[in-house]
Image (spheres, helix red, strand yellow):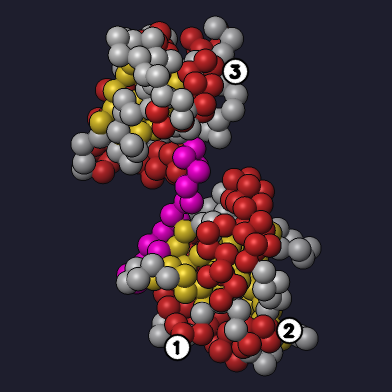
């Protein structure tokens, strides 16, 4: 995504130009950042231009195809937000002194920005993905992509839990329909609420889900985050667990600001304990192996 359209009451401001310039400096790539007035935008989107459409379906509604497919809209207008959401287009609110003076509430969006020129490219990508209903890509390693899981991943998630995994982890019910419901709820109540969770690990080679790993709030007495992971049996012993988990732990420390991370495993799970030690955790034994980073 490198196309942003500001929908503004006043298009004479520097928002679009400054945003485009800062994104170009950051990424080294040209961004298509434009500004259109609210009145012109709503006329076209509602079909009151010179070429109205008689289509009834969502894809045939006026204005649906006036912009590139991957466009993020930033607007300071409540009416524009409603129209964009009705069209199924990704929108972010833009709050400033003028919008507040007009009494614009900018409700119904996941994000509201106040200084659009200061937003980094990765944040714009994540705003777009969230508004478009797409899973966030968290990070990439040499061989893996780590991203949020979706309901469409349900059967692949269930396939991770072979007999060895079930020895040490609580397995989900072997019902794809139920797992899809769980993943859909997880996206709404965890990913959207916290911005982190347990993510999927996918092979760059073929796109297959090869594992899952991530963070959950620790239920102990302190404010540590709990780290867990699982790799599909066909991908174990090849360094994928260390490669992905090391990158995720760095992300937790550097991007999410987690100061303390814990993990635990059964004493019989020697391979897991060895991996945690290799990842830098300090291990201590009780009825289970408790690790801290």
Q: Is residue 175 left or right of residue 152?
A: right
First of labels 2, 3 by sequence position: 3
Residue under pointer 1: 237
Question: In the rendered image of this protein, does residue 108 appear above or below residue 285?
Answer: above
Disc assigned to residue 105: 3
- Nearest the eye: 290 or 174: 174
| Secondary structure type for disc 3 | loop
Q: Is residue 8 visible?
A: no
First of labels 1, 2 by sequence position: 1
Q: Is residue 229 visible?
A: yes
Residue 146 in which image quadrant: bottom left
Measuring 59% from the left and 18% from the top, which residue is drawn there?
105
Measuring 33% from the left and 37% from the top, which residue is drawn there?
69
* The N terminus sits in image quarter: top left
Residue 256 coordinates in the image, percent (x, y): 53, 53
Which of discs 2 and 3 lies nearer the camera? The answer is 3
Q: Which residues are magenta?
A: 130-145
| Secondary structure type for disc 2 | loop
| Secondary structure type for disc 1 | loop
Residue 222 coordinates in the image, percent (x, y): 74, 61
Q: Is residue 188 left or right of residue 32?
A: right
Residue under pointer 2: 288
Residue 188 coordinates in the image, percent (x, y): 63, 47
Is 144 inside the magenta-drawn segment? yes
């Amino acid at each position: 995504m490198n196309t942003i359209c500001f929908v503004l009451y006043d298009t004479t401001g520097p928002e679009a130009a400054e945003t485009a310039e800062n994104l170009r400096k950051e990424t080294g790539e040209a961004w298509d950042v434009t500004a259109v007035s609210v009145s012109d935008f709503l006329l076209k989107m509602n079909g009151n231009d010179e070429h109205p459409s008689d289509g009834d379906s969502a894809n045939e509604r006026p204005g649906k195809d006036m912009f590139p497919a991957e466009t993020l809209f930033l607007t300071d207008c409540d009416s524009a937000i409603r129209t964009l959401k009705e069209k199924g287009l990704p929108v972010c609110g833009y709050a400033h002194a003028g919008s507040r003076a007009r009494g614009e509430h900018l409700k119904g969006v996941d994000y509201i920005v106040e200084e659009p020129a200061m937003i980094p490219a990765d944040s714009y990508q994540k705003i777009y993905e969230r508004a478009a209903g797409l899973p966030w890509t968290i990070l990439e390693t040499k061989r893996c992509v780590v991203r949020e899981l979706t309901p469409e991943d349900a059967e692949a998630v269930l396939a991770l839990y072979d007999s060895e995994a079930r020895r040490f982890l609580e397995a989900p019910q072997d019902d794809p329909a139920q797992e899809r419901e769980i993943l859909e709820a997880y996206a709404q109540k965890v990913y959207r609420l916290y911005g982190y969770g347990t993510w999927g690990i996918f092979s760059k080679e073929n796109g297959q889900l090869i594992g899952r790993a991530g963070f959950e709030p620790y239920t102990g007495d302190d404010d540590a985050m709990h780290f867990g992971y699982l790799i599909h049996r066909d991908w174990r012993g090849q360094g994928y667990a260390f490669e992905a988990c090391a990158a995720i732990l760095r992300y937790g420390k550097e991007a999410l600001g987690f100061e303390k991370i814990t993990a635990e495993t059964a004493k019989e799970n020697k391979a897991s304990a060895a991996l945690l030690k290799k990842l830098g955790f300090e291990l201590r034994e009780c009825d289970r192996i408790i690790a801290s980073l």
